Amino acid sequence: MQKRSSSFTVLGLLFVIIGITLMEDNIYLKYGFLVLGIAFLSYSIFTMVKKK
C-alpha cells in the first residue's frame, strides 16, 4: 500500500508541475492538469493520514 500511495504522490506532483508550466496554452488543459494533480496529492495525503 505504501508503494501505491507514493506513486500517487509522484503523479500528483508531476501533473501539478505540468499544469504550472503550461502558461500560455489552453486554459482548460492547464487547470485540468492542476485539478488532476491536486486530486492525486490529496488522495495520497488522505491515505497517509488515515493509515496513521
Image (cartoon, grey):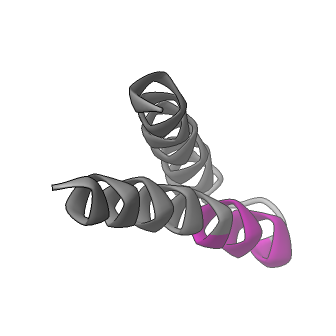
User: What stretch of residues is rendered in magenta?
Assistant: 27-35
Q: Looking at the magenta stretch, what is its main secondary structure?
A: helix
How many discs appear?
0
Q: Nearer the viewer, residue 48 or 10?
A: 48
Across and down, in percent, residue 17 comes to 49, 43
Q: Residue 45 appears at what percent x and percent y? A: 32, 59
* Residue at 55% over, 57% down: 40
State which quadrant residue 49 falls in.
bottom left
The outermost residue toward the left is 52
Query: In the depicted view, which residue is nearer to us: 23 or 11?
Result: 11
Task: Point out the image quarter for the C terminus.
Answer: bottom left
16 lies left or right of 50: right
- Which residue is the extreme one toward the top? 3
Q: Of residues 5 and 51, which is closer to you in this image? A: 51
Looking at the picture, does residue 34 appear above or below residue 3? below
> In this image, 13 relative to 45: left or right?
right
Residue 51 lies in quadrant: bottom left
Q: Residue at x 52, y 47 (%)?
A: 12
Image quadrant where residue 30 sits: bottom right
Query: What residue do we see at 42% from left, 67% from top?
Result: 42
Classify 26 as above or below 21: below
Question: Is 28 included in the stretch rendered in magenta?
Answer: yes
Task: Return the x and y of residue 35 as percentages of the image width and height.
Answer: 62, 73
For the point 76% across and 76% down, the residue is: 27
Give the x, y percent position of residue 13: 45, 42
Instruction: Name the one closer to the observer, 12 or 46.
Output: 46
Horizontal side, residue 3 vs residue 29: left or right:
left
